[in-house]
Image (spheres, helix red, strand yellow):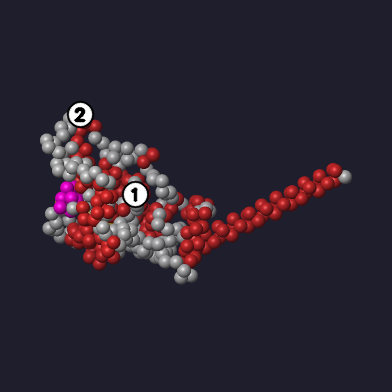
Amino acid sequence: MTDVASSGDQQGWRGWIRAFAIAALMLTALLLGFIVALDPYGTRVQAGQPARPLMDLNQRFMYPQIVKSGAFDSAVLGTSTMRLLDPEILSKGLSARFANLGMNAATPWEQSQLAGLFAHRVAAPKLVIWGIDQTWCEADATDEARRLTPRPFPPWLYDDNAWNDWAKQLNFTTLEIALRLAAHRLGLQPQRLRGDGYEVFTPPEATYDLARARFHLYHGQAPDLAPQSPPAAAPAKERASWRFPALAWLEQGLAAFPATTRRLIVLPPVHAGAMPREGSAAWQRFAACKAEITAIAARQKAVVADYAHPSVLTREDSNYWDPAHYRLPIARRIEADLIALGRGEAAPDDPALTVVGAPR
């Protein structure tokens, strides 16, 4: 009797395990089918097809489909220091179709991946505006540990292999975004980012508080913004050791575009307190990095619009929310400058802007 009971128990367990496995497979297939049907990352998007509504704030996952749609022939690249530039204003002023592909805290490597995708997938790129922050000048910027941030990055969305895309999406994050997209389709939820990638991510201008901004700028201790006097002496041996390895990615990225693509490099205006002190050894190293950027621009027939230096723009606290992010009126000012340069006009009469290279 015991053997019979034991045999019955084993059969019962086997049946339960089999039923559980079948149910799990069916649920997995159902969830994957839901994700495939909604396609929240636009993995099926091809040129001539619209991108899906952008339902997540991690631009690393959202922007590839904007590029692959072919709806835009021009792009803003960079980090959040470029994200307030409105593609609609740039498109109207430059007779182009702009997308803003600036990514929060994007590393040079991540920016290079997106630039490469744009160069590869857009039939005739018209104009590229690439914002280059100080991170490009860091000596370890190309180290494996510095290529990514804590934000996930999906290299499979940037390659040409479509077969590896779906397996990567079977996770709770993708399911959540697919559910958001379904809610949007039903009119229950707005899209998170505008279809051209643009978002005003700073607080409403009506809420601006200078005292609060200064707290974020200085954290209770204002730096000395006056030039160091006398300037630091950087020995020749130290200067010879300065390396900016990520700039090789910048040159490769620019070179990937057709000769007909106009290239505009922007050194965005961060607050003066976020830059090395003028005259210091760090400032001299930054100047050497900018000189290398200018040399790359000359080789790649690009124009450099440099706001990254002490000026009335970068020293004025009321222009900023925090050390890295300027306010909307400053964005409108930069857009006007870039439209003039993009049209091939003479350098704008902006005392905060240094232009290197002849517009074309």
In percent of width and height, residue 177 lies at 47, 59
Say left or right for 23 vs 261: right
> Does the magenta portion include 255?
no
In percent of width and height, residue 150 lies at 41, 46
Figure quadrant of residue 148? top left
Say left or right for 340 vs 180: left
In percent of width and height, residue 310 lies at 17, 47
Residue type indicated by callout 2: Lys
> Crowdedness of circle 1 by 10 Å Cα count: few (<14), some, many (20+)?
some
Count how many numbered circles sit on residues in the image.
Answer: 2
Mark whose residue sits in front, 2 or 1: 1
Q: How many angstroms separate mark 2 from mark 1 (CA)?
A: 33 Å
Which residue is found at the position 18% from the left and 42% from the top?
Answer: 224
Which residue is farthest bottom? 187
Q: Which residue is mark 1?
A: 105
Numbered badge on residue 237? 2
Numbered badge on residue 21? none
Numbered range of the magenta stretch: 306-315
Figure quadrant of residue 202? bottom left
Residue type indicated by callout 1: Ala
Which residue is found at the position 21% from the left and 38% from the top?
Answer: 282
The residue tagged with tag 2: helix, strand or loop? helix
